[in-house]
């Protein structure tokens, strides 16, 4: 039973291990990570909502999606240093796992999905987004791949079937 699970999800486990390894090497949970924006996850959620109220920027959607999960950590008394680093590490893991799931659905190939995630995690874009963190971009990095994965299930399957029929 466990071997079958490992075989089916080897790509997810590889990417998860790579992400955790990167987090353990690079993140310092004793230091506060300050974003280059007004939507830091360790702020009061009501303050964040007041700052983004009336804006037309779609990028705020990620922070709104993640705020219910992150803000309670601050309410239970975790230090802002821990909350900010958990926010970074969670978004790194969610973004890479989301790309793995999305590319697996599109390609139906475990090697291709692992390769896609390794390319994402080793790209300069990922390095930039996590080295000079803008918490709104981080929220998008962690949320958008999973959002596309969950919202596109039917369409990707239909597109894949249609393209296969055209080739035959």
Image: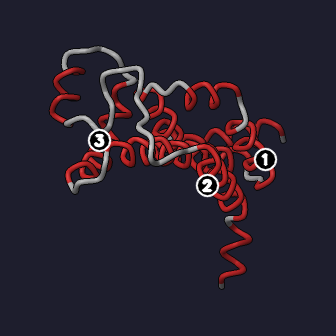
Residue 98 x/y as whole percent: 56, 46
Disc sitting over residue 67 in the figure: 3
* Marks 2 and 3, how far apart at CA: 22 Å
User: With respect to residue 8, does 53 lie above or below?
Assistant: above
- Using a 10 Å C-alpha cutoff, classify the residue at mark 3 as few (fewer than 14 neighbours), some (14 to 19) or many (20 or more): many
* Marks 1 and 2, how far apart at CA: 21 Å
Q: For the residues carrying marks 1 and 3, which lies nearer the camera in this image?
A: 3
Q: Pointer 2 and pointer 3: residues touching (CB < 8 Å)?
A: no
- Disc 2 target residue: 20
- Using a 10 Å C-alpha cutoff, classify the residue at mark 2 as few (fewer than 14 neighbours), some (14 to 19) or many (20 or more): some
User: With respect to residue 5, does 127 lie above or below?
Assistant: above
Residue 17 x/y as whole percent: 67, 58
Q: Residue at x 71, y 30 (%)?
A: 123
Q: Pointer 1 and pointer 3: residues touching (CB < 8 Å)?
A: no
Left or right: 15 in relation to 31: right
Label 1's element?
A: helix
Work out which residue is located at the far right of the displayed protein and give it. 168
Quadrant housing the C terminus: top right
| Residue 122, quarter of the rendered image | top right
Q: For the residues carrying marks 2 and 3, which lies nearer the camera in this image?
A: 2
| Residue 9, quarter of the rendered image | bottom right
Colouring: secondary structure
Of 78 and 110, the residue lying toward us:
78
Q: Residue at x 82, y 37 (%)?
A: 167
Q: Looking at the image, is mark 2 or mark 3 earlier in the sequence?
A: 2
């Amino acid at each position: 039973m466990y071997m079958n699970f490992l075989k089916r999800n080897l790509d997810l486990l590889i990417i998860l291990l790579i992400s955790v390894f990167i987090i353990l090497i690079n993140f310092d949970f004793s230091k506060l990570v300050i974003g280059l924006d007004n939507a830091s996850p360790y702020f009061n959620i009501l303050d964040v909502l007041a700052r983004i109220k009336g804006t037309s920027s779609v990028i705020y959607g990620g922070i709104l999606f993640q705020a219910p999960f992150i803000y309670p950590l601050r309410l239970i008394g975790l230090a802002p240093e821990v909350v900010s680093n958990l926010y970074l590490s969670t978004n790194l893991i969610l973004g890479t796992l989301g790309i793995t799931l999305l590319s697996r659905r599109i390609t139906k190939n475990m090697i291709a999905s692992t390769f896609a995630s390794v390319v994402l995690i080793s790209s300069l874009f990922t390095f930039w987004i996590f080295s000079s963190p803008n918490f709104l971009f981080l929220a998008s990095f962690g949320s958008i791949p999973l959002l596309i994965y969950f919202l596109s299930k039917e369409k990707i399957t239909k597109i894949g079937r249609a393209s296969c029929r055209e080739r035959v």
